[in-house]
Amino acid sequence: MKKVVLLLRVSTNSQDYEYQRSTLTDLCNRNGWEVVRTFENKVSGAKKNEEREEIVELLDYIKNNEVDMVMATEVSRVGRNTLEALKTIEILNENKVNLYFANYNIETLLPDKTVNPIARLILTICLEISAYERNLIRYRMLDFLNCDFFTFEEFHHQLFIKFCN
């Protein structure tokens, strides 16, 4: 039976992990995999690995325990900083721990525990798209906050214009 660790991340305190937890747990139950640990955190995926408690603990755990696979619902749960996420993936690969992304049904390691080159290519592209999305949101928010608004109605009108264009 495969020993699996779940990696759950949300960006804000108002969000919860329920969708991620239920999606991954259901997948494990269907495949007969044992969930041995869950790491979760409410933190921006753009932070460095050292600033993400769940990543630090996860990497320590996989080095000191028997784990076959880490599961995440999507690549942005590992991070929205391409280099930091690739560092995490590399450490998992070096320790022969497969990383599985449920939304793409893709694994970072082949059955012989060597790196899956197609997964590496696809995930690098997906990580860059994820970083781009985060930067775009950040840019829009900063641009929006720098606007001068005089009335509540004008504020909503400007909001409508910005997000419809």
Image: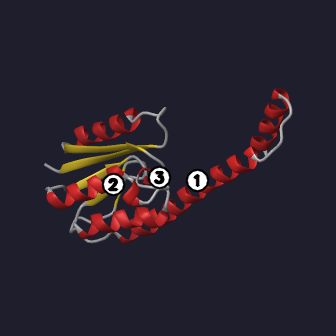
If you read the primary sequence from the N terminus, does the residue marked by circle 3 or circle 2 appear first?
3
**x and y percentages locating residue 82 in the rendered image:** 48, 64
Mark 2–mark 1 Cα distance, whole angstroms, equals 19 Å
- The residue wearing badge 1 is 134
Is 159 on the left-hand or right-hand side of 72? Answer: right
Instruction: Check disc 2: other Cα within 10 Å, few if <14, some if 14-19, many if 20+.
Output: many
Residue at screen point 83% across, 42% down: 148
- The residue wearing badge 2 is 55
**x and y percentages locating residue 61 in the rendered image:** 21, 55
Instruction: Check disc 1: other Cα within 10 Å, few if <14, some if 14-19, many if 20+.
Output: some
As shown in the figure, which amino acid type bears the numbered disc 2?
A: Ile
Indicate which disc residue 45 carries.
3
**x and y percentages locating residue 96 in the rendered image:** 22, 66
Kind of element beneath mark 1: helix
Q: Is residue 83 above or below residue 72?
A: below
Kind of element beneath mark 2: helix
As shown in the figure, which amino acid type bears the numbered disc 1?
A: Arg
**x and y percentages locating residue 134 in the rendered image:** 58, 53
Q: Do the residues labelled 2 and 1 touch (CB within 8 Å)?
A: no
Mark 3–mark 2 Cα distance, whole angstroms, equals 10 Å
Front residue of this view, candidates 160 and 60: 60
